[in-house]
Image: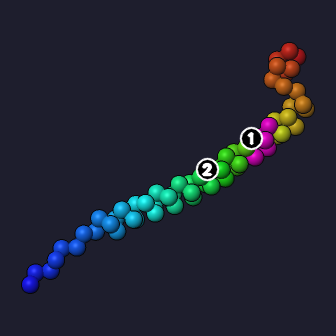
Amino acid sequence: MPAVPKSYLPSFAAFLAFGITYTTVVATKEGAAVDGARTRWQDQHARARNALSGGMSLVDMERK
């Protein structure tokens, strides 16, 4: 007797549903982590520019 073909569609659909859900949750957390890191870097960069310029802005420097 020939083997009955097995459908992998239910397994594939479950895999896709789990994968999309997992990726959405993980990607959201990773996106928040990247945003936090970018904000920290921008703040640090602004503090460094402020320290190097002696507290003067670019407009103040152009006026001198």
Magenta-colored segment: predominant secondary structure: helix
Q: Amino acid at mark 1?
A: Gln
The percent coordinates of residue 26 (x first, y second) are: 57, 58
Q: Is residue 49 above or below residue 17?
A: above
The percent coordinates of residue 30 (x first, y second) are: 61, 54
Q: Nearer the viewer, residue 52 or 16?
A: 16
Residue at numbered disc 2: 31
Residue at numbered disc 1: 42
Q: Nearer the viewer, residue 9 or 22?
A: 9
Q: Counting other residues with Cα less than 10 Å from the Cα at mark 1, is it few (<14), some (14-19), or many (20 or more)?
A: few
Kind of element beneath mark 1: helix
Q: Is residue 57 above or below residue 41?
A: above
Looking at the rendering, the stretch of residues picked out in magenta corresponds to 40-46
Q: Amino acid at mark 2?
A: Gly
Tell me what residue is drawn at x 8 percent, y 84 percent: 1
Tell me what residue is drawn at x 57 percent, y 57 percent: 25
Q: Is residue 8 above or below residue 37?
A: below
Of marks 1 and 2, which one's residue comes earlier in the chain?
A: 2
User: Please, which residue is most extreme toward the left here?
Assistant: 1
Residue 53 located left or right of residue 31: right
Tell me what residue is drawn at x 74 percent, y 41 percent: 42
Residue 54 falls in image quadrant: top right
Residue 27 falls in image quadrant: bottom right
Q: Is residue 57 above or below residue 20?
A: above
Pointers 1 and 2 in contact (CB under 8 A)? no
User: Please, which residue is most extreme toward the top here?
Assistant: 63
